[in-house]
Image (tube, grey):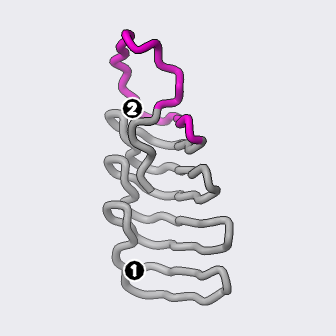
Amino acid sequence: MRAPEGQDSGDEGGPDEYHSWIIHGYGKKEWTNGARYEGNWKNNMSHGKGKLYHPNGDVFDGHFKKDMASGFGVFSRLDGFKQEGNWAEDKMHGEGKETMPNGTIYEGQF
């Protein structure tokens, strides 16, 4: 669920211009590839409750810690695939539920 690295929203200045902005609190950011994040930030990283939208339509809605899915969250794809439960370091971890596009459901430990 990590946000795209090294891709800025395009609002920075030219190559010789330096900005020392620190994103902290609630905010939104959009990358040039179309990915966007809306939610809480801490020291320029998604941290706390937020929503990460991927260019292909995938969405993660949940908690982040240091730019990674961490805590409870729901990852969903346009084809109907869904993972909901606890996350640690961008992976399902512990109790969770996975729903396949055909309706098959797995509930248990990840």
Magenta-colored segment: predominant secondary structure = loop
Q: Amino acid at mark 2?
A: His
Element assignment for label 2: loop
The stretch in magenta equals 8-33
Q: Is residue 59 above or below residue 99?
A: above
Residue at horizontal 51 percent and vertical 88 percent from the top = 106
Residue at horizontal 60 percent and vertical 74 percent from the top = 81
Label at residue 5: none
Element assignment for label 1: strand
Q: Is residue 92 above or below residue 101?
A: above
Q: Which residue is disc 1 drawn over?
A: 95
Residue at horizontal 66 percent and vertical 73 percent from the top = 80
Q: How many other residues sit within 10 Å of disc 1, few (<14), some (14-19) or many (≥20)? A: some
Q: Residue 90: x percent and y percent?
A: 37, 61
Q: Is residue 104 above or below residue 110?
A: below
Q: Residue 45: x percent and y percent?
A: 36, 40
Rendering quarter of residue 34: top right
Which numbered disc flags the more N-terminal residue, 2 or 1?
2
Q: Residue 1: x percent and y percent?
A: 45, 56
Q: Which residue is disc 2 drawn over?
A: 24
Q: Amino acid at mark 1?
A: Glu
Q: Using residue 101 as the reference point, say whether residue 46 is left or right of it.
A: left
Q: Residue 4: x percent and y percent?
A: 44, 44
